[in-house]
Amino acid sequence: MKNHTHAQPHEISAAFEPAHPVRFAAARKSTWVSIFINLCLTVMQVLAGFFGKSQSLMADGLHSLADLLSDVLVLFANRHGNKHADADHPYGHARIETAASLILGSSLAVLGVGLLIAAGMRLQHPEQVQAVHPITLWVAIAALAAKEGMFRYMLAVALRVRSQMLVANAWHARSDAASSLVVIVGIVGNLLGYTFLDLIAAAVVGVMIAYMGIQFARDALLELVDTGLDEAEVRAIRNTLKAVPGVHGLHELRTRKMADNALVDAHIIVDPKISVSEGHYIAEAARSAVLNTHHVMDVMVHIDSEDDAHVRPNARLPQRHLLLAHLTQRLGESLPASTRVVLHYLQGKIEAELLFAAPVNLDVWRSKLAAIAADDPYFRSIQLYQGSAPD
């Protein structure tokens, strides 16, 4: 007996909704705060760096600009990623966040490498490096304070609403804070007479930006190629499924991430002699157990009567109508009217149960059926019962 259980079409909207409206509102508010701060920092740092002759401060300003662009991507992803599932996207739109993370990470990597190359080229002519204006130091300190405060605020919101994209954006703010600290060191060194330190700081900022971008792009790419959950989480899901009453075994447990959630597929083994409806009930119980215990978007449970990964395949066996025709041919006569036939496809053979509603000579029929099962290529056993067939 095999069966699959997953969300029905009328349940898709609720089962696949990736976020609560409260999360959407909180994410939008925090992102608008970040946009405002990054816009102010970009203008302040780029202008102060340009007129104050500080390459590192200008690089940090471009870092703020990158975060400003990332904020716009967050707003876009948060708006479209929270849409309900539809006919074209039955699993929802949550991976819009993943795509946005990939675009953002790739952009940051390119920007960081560009800043590193520019600083390296200017370091080849250290005699042309000028002393920076003292105002650039105060601008860098103000930027450090603003970015650290923004990081703490955004991270608190991200953890509260459980948003992978917002966590990534919060850590962008922390990377900006770290880069501002490097800029401060470079500007102080420049003011003390070591003018090349400002360019060194600009190069370090470029490396930091590129590293963060590569990390975010890599994580997004791993999700887009359906990388599974970590081993500990998979083991916990496995234990949850095995603990469900009626589940005798488990194999082919597969997982994949979708933004902040996960999708799970599993094959569970149940008693092969139970009814289809009872097997489906066990599958629904297994699915509910995983959904209620783990941070999972949906679970598809495949019901097996045996471990089909290690036993003889049943696919080569004939279907019901062909088997009954084969049995009639071997008997030389048709089965009595109203006979109920139950077939169990197990270990590459058929175990049949026949329920005769009409009175018959059971000893004669049992002898015939036993002789057939003794050398039949399909039937392993044929059990015969007599009684009233259920309606």
Image (cartoon, grey):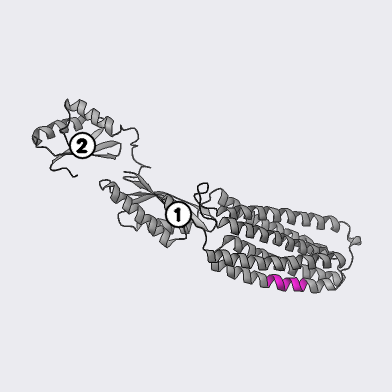
Q: Name the residue at 76% across, 73% down.
A: 141
Instruction: Give the SS element for disc 1.
Output: strand
Q: Which residues are magenta?
A: 140-148
Q: Amino acid at mark 1?
A: Asp
Instruction: Give the SS element for disc 2.
Output: strand
Q: Do callouts 1 and 2 mark residues in contact (Cβ within 8 Å)?
A: no
Residue that numbered label 1 is attached to: 298
The rendered magenta stretch, by its main secondary structure, is classed as helix
Residue 365 visible? The answer is yes
Q: Name the residue at 67% across, 56% down.
A: 213
Depth check, front residue: 141 or 157: 157
The quarter holding residue 75 reads bottom right
Q: Is residue 372 above or below residue 44?
A: above
Residue that numbered label 2 is attached to: 381
Q: For the C terminus, which image quadrant?
A: top left
1 vs 40, left or right, is left
